[in-house]
Image (cartoon, grey):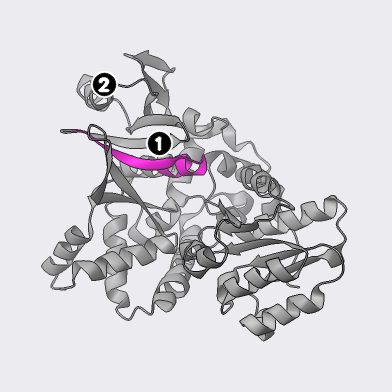
Amino acid sequence: MNDLSLNKQTCVSRPRYLEFALNYLDKPLIKVITGMRRSGKSVILKLIRQELLNRGIAPERILYINFESQETAPFSTQQTLYQYIKDFAKEGRFYLLLDEVQYVENWERVLASCRVDFNCDIFITGSNAKLLSGELATLLSGRYINIPVYPLSFEEFLQFRNAFTGENAAADRRAAFFDYLRFGGLPGIHEIAGSAGFEPDIIRPYLIDIFNSVLLKDVISRKQIRDTELLERIVRFVMDNIGHIVSAKSISDFLKHQGRKHSTETVYNYLAALSEAYLLRKIGRYDIKGKRQLETLEKYYAEDAGIQNAVYGYHETDISGLLENAVCLELLRRGYAVSIGQLPQKEIDFIATKGGEKIYIQVAYLLADKAVIDREFSGLEEIQDNYPKLVLSMDPVWEYNREGIIRRNIIDWLLDSH
């Protein structure tokens, strides 16, 4: 069912996700692969199918369905999909791989029934964060594992460039990194660019098309939003303020100055919809002294910097925000929960926690003089605990330590194996 061909994108297996998913193979959990459109979820699902074949699973024991295909229209309802799976099911175990399952009416109930009625292992993908809430959480509480897929890391970006150009992109890491900041991490840009390299006039329309598709299918249609012009204004405002404190009230006040009066609640709902569609990532603030999560004045980061630059425009003066964006996404890829650190008079760019581990991080473009160095280090020096503290910048310097705070080159840190 549907196209099962493996294209050049599968030359880079993205083992972070593939290995994580296969750790749960034949475990009694539904594997839920989530992420924004065109982030590579479908390729990972195809690679899982290929791995099953490599392990000796017969093709007739694997049912793969891509619900973005018109071929699936006859069974896009709860009853027709269940009957199709039932007709496929045979004696013995089989593997059910459903791509973009959110298109199916009452798909949660289909999966809940499949767990009970059939001897099967289930993998699904979806492009909306609501996949993990609502009825799925109710029907399958404790019976699924989320596998979030992000746009390419910088390490993966280099691997994709190597696969598509046949050259060693890491030879000039700094130039490749600025390409990464500008064009983002969606795998498809490498296929579009091919061996010729990145041309803004070619890449930008592709990214804008993805943005429009996400906005239409995952936000406007799903949430039945009528004021699309307001939605686009909010997107542009947030993407123009990456790395800055943003609130629904500040956006509402901005719109009011433009002659558009809308309630804070409306703006908040639109921001939530954009986050659910994986266009934006909301990062809350944490009071370091009071040791509590703050409920207002969060920051938003773009899920993909390439889309941000395509929609808002690429400006070299935005480099600090783009660097923060890259670090934030990398921390999330590495499995950390991320917050903005709040001190009485200062701000820490990121607090990253995972289990009993915690890291404090400041991000700067260049530590050009003593004043800048003191500004970036002083906040970290106020924190009286023994957790690691980092200052990341583009300075081509060797790693060194100041009062227990490690200064590192941001590219080196991004390319660390974690």
Q: CA distance from mark 2 to mark 1?
A: 17 Å
Three-letter amino acid code of the residue under disc 1: Ala
User: For numbered disc 2, what is the local secondary structure?
Assistant: helix
Q: Which residues are magenta?
A: 328-343
Q: Residue at 30% x, 68% y: name it.
A: 269
Image spot of residue 401 (x, y percent):
37, 14
Q: Residue at x 31, y 37 (%)?
A: 349
**What quarter of the picture does the C terminus occupy?**
top right
The answer to whether residue 127 of the structure is visible from this angle is no
Q: Position of residue 385 (x, y in %)?
A: 32, 22
Amino acid of disc 2: Glu
Residue 387 percent location from the top left of the image? 38, 24
Residue plotted at (44% across, 64% down): 277
Say which of 48 and 38 sits in front.
48
- The residue where tag 2 is placed is 381
* Mark toward the start of the polypeptide (2 vs 1): 1
**Badge 1, how many Cα within 10 Å: few under 14, some, many 20+?**
many
Q: Report the front residue among 306 and 56.
A: 56
Q: Which residue is mark 1?
A: 352
